[in-house]
Amino acid sequence: MGIREVDEFGRRLRAELPAATRLDPQTRAAYGSDASLYRVLPTAVLEPRDLDELGAALAIAREHGVPVTSRGGGTSVAGNAIGTGLVVDFSRHLNRVLAIDPDARTATVQPGVVLDELRRQAAGHGLTFGPDPSTQSRCTLGGMIGNNACGPHSVAWGTTAEVVHRLDLLLADGRALTAGPGGSADAELDRRLITLRDKHLPELRLELGRFRRQVSGYNLAELLPEKGFHLARALVGSEGTCAVLTGATVALTPLPAAKVLLVLGFADVYTAADQAPLLAAAGALTVEGMDEQLIAALGNGPGSVAAKELPPGRAWLYCEVAGADQAGAAARAAELAGLVEASALVVTDASRTAALWRIRKDGAGIATRMADGGEAWPGWEDSAVPPERLGGYLRELHALLGAHGYRGIAYGHFGEGCLHLRCDWDLLTPHGVSRYREFIEAAADLVVAHGGTSSGEHGDGRARSALLARTYSPALLAAFAGFKRIFDPDGLLNPGVLVAPRPLDADLRPGHDRIDLPVVHALHADNGSFAAAVRRCVGVGSCRQASGAMCPSYQVTGDELHSTRGRARVLGEMLRGELLDPDATAVHAALDLCLSCKACKQECPVQVDMATYKAEFLHHHYRRKLRPRAHYTLGWLPLLARLARPAPGLANALTARPAARRLAGLEPRRDPVSFARTSFRSWWRRRGGPRGAGTPVLLWPDTFTNFIQPEIGIAAVEVLEALGYRVELPPGPVCCGLTWHSTGQLDMARRVLRRSVRALAGDRLVIGLEPSCTVLLREDAAELVPEAAGLGTRVRTLAELVAAHEGDWPFARLDAKAIRQPHCHQQATFGDAAEREVLSRLGIEVDEVDAGCCGLAGNFGFEPGHWDVAQACAERQLYPRIRAAPASTMVLADGFSCRTQAGQGTEVTAEHTASVLRRALSPPASSRSGG
């Protein structure tokens, strides 16, 4: 397929399907990889809104000889969902549950529906979908059917192939087909399949279907007469190489009445593997294993607190146990624990159970970094053996790793003999890639020697299709090729996978960086390398969840490009230097809707920090260039606020005019902030500075508190003095540099921060009131300037100081209800446990907004082009909860942006914790301090 044909294909597609077609380089970059090691840039991306658009696109692709690859959530670790031609993303529009039949216990779905959504709807009928891979919050049913996904519960509830009833398909030649038990309605196609099957009966019976997790190759055993010639199940695991899935009917399973989590600790991972089949046979709903290396890789990241609850051992099995009620499930768990020699923990609390499960579910991300910070990769990711042979296989696999000089982190579905393994391959050099291939081929021979296959879920893809020749006989490989040929004779559907595979070391994503931007941030965790930081994103796709804090712009747009993963892929292409470069407007477009909320730093299991990457990019992109006017207006806000100090009323009158806001490069629909008549420092000087002789603390006078809402600073002073502290302010004008940092003006941010750090010399605690400024001082300052090393240990929020206070408690109970918007930066770093504790002690019943960033996000919501996303973020939870609450309900938000967003979107006045504490002081603070 030449360049002319590709260009003509793109023109046709855009002309006939303009709303569904995307040809821009940043979108192509975002879809160039999935959760695998591989990178293949598509010619175009299609987001069909209906089956007519899908059929039309397939016809155009067929006419131009362009290959077609189906994609769901892009969470495959084998490289199944990438291709050179047209990539069809079903997840954005064709994503509905069409029907649930509770009597038949079935569901009919579109291919793009996310598993968690199906499970949520099924739960209303007391049912669930049995297979549940760890990516259940973003993987799609289409992808699960393509890869024959399994998950922890498949040990009890079956693999995807076992629960599929019927598939609706579109063949490469444009024909619609429905496949099910007994074949299809196409008699000629069924005749050809039966002829193929009968020709290869010995291979199908002897080589396939030997154990549940044998998913390598096509699932042709389902064509056998004793299997009922179940064509739908034969096509499960075909990875989009035979047909395009347009719908499916699947079986649902009843939810247990009650269940508990039994965690068993073993002396080593081999003993855990040896004992796993016994627990599976005894009826555990899950038998999930992990070794101590995974726990070590957690570090201080998400899950590290929960990991401390694990029972003694160096490897663990997670066994979910069902019962008629909680007591019965716990009793049954105790019985299972008695079957093995292990330490045991039975967990009945739902929140503790979820925290422990998160460690296992985040394994694919956690395991990408060794405990010492070294990079680890998939590759030998899903091998499987008959469960009773797992212990022996794992012992020999670790010996093979040692012989090749590699380290690996093992975890997986031990009850079914399926092992996940991330290893520290060197994929950055040609020699390292050659050694990687040698190991993979040796490991393939090893797993076959143990009666297993290289894939136990996630399919073969680009990672393992080439290993099929080491796994199966030439006769069975010929059967696979014949099966593919019956459905797709021209090889248009996902070529290079399963049949005529690409080499397993072709198209690797790592190791091709030509650029590594010189960084301003130290990037200590990535040894100062921007490329290594970007490589943190392995594509697990946690940023594509429909709820939670990450990633706000993806949640409101549904656009892969505006997920954290999509942005990381674009940055990776920029560093590769082939499709994009640092000056490309395409890269800027991909990062533009990033709110810099930092949720990815906490929620992503690999702790990708897109806010920092965006700041670095903007710093380089605009170096020696004229910036957008908003960068000067908002980035230099601390200086502009000081300049407005002599005449704040005049400044407010000017900014109140829409024409002035447009001139300043600001969103005209956004109300401007108003400068206070008297600044916090002016009030401080007028009252005479510090008072009392208690323990001195430094109160940080951030720009927002000092110039815009000084009443918060005043309240904080009165609260701290009521607790017996001597409040002091840093000398001279100080600023953390936040606004310069968020707009990528990093040279200025460092200059301002250095001066401010000098003003904080000594050992006094520094109390922050604005969470974003507090986080910068506490977490980011040391990344920007060496002088800030150690500063973070002295920085506290007001609530942290109040919660830790051991003297008299001078606050009365307020006994009120409140809606609270936590600050996204604080949530992503040190959390807000202290704020919640203080509010509880004040008798305030809090309804927490748990949707992450409010949407204003500092400068983001004031910049043109961001209004719709900013408002949509607030509409996820913040605005609806405020509108639905009684008028007496308090609205709490410590962040200036959060209070502004709440006030402008609902006309409520949101309060800071400092104001609430001052109100709770008894006697009233005003009578003590004289106002």
Image: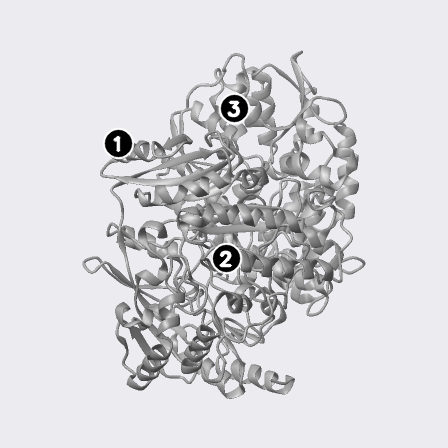
Which label lies toward us, 1 or 3?
1
Q: CA distance from mark 1 to mark 3?
A: 47 Å
x 49%, y 52%: residue:
873
x 50%, y 49%: residue:
393
Name the amino acid, label 1. Answer: Ala
Which residue is disc 1 drawn over? 327
Looking at the image, tell me whether mark 2 or mark 1 is earlier in sequence order. 1
Q: How is the image coloured?
A: one colour
Which label lies toward us, 2 or 3?
2
Q: Quadrant of residue 715?
A: top right
Name the amino acid, label 3. Answer: Arg
Q: Is residue 251 above or below residue 374?
A: below
The quarter of the image holding the N terminus is: bottom right
Q: Secondary structure at mark 3?
A: helix
Q: Secondary structure at mark 2?
A: helix
Q: Quadrant of residue 524?
A: top right
Task: Determine whether label 2 and label 3 are within 8 Å by CB.
Answer: no
Which label lies toward us, 2 or 1?
2
In the rendered image, residue 333, in percent from the top left (x then y), is placed at: 32, 34
Pick the front one: 582 or 623: 582
Which residue is disc 3 drawn over? 918
The quarter of the image holding the C terminus is: top right
| Relative to 884, 404 lies left or right | right
Looking at the image, tell me whether mark 1 or mark 3 is earlier in sequence order. 1
Which residue is disc 2 drawn over? 449
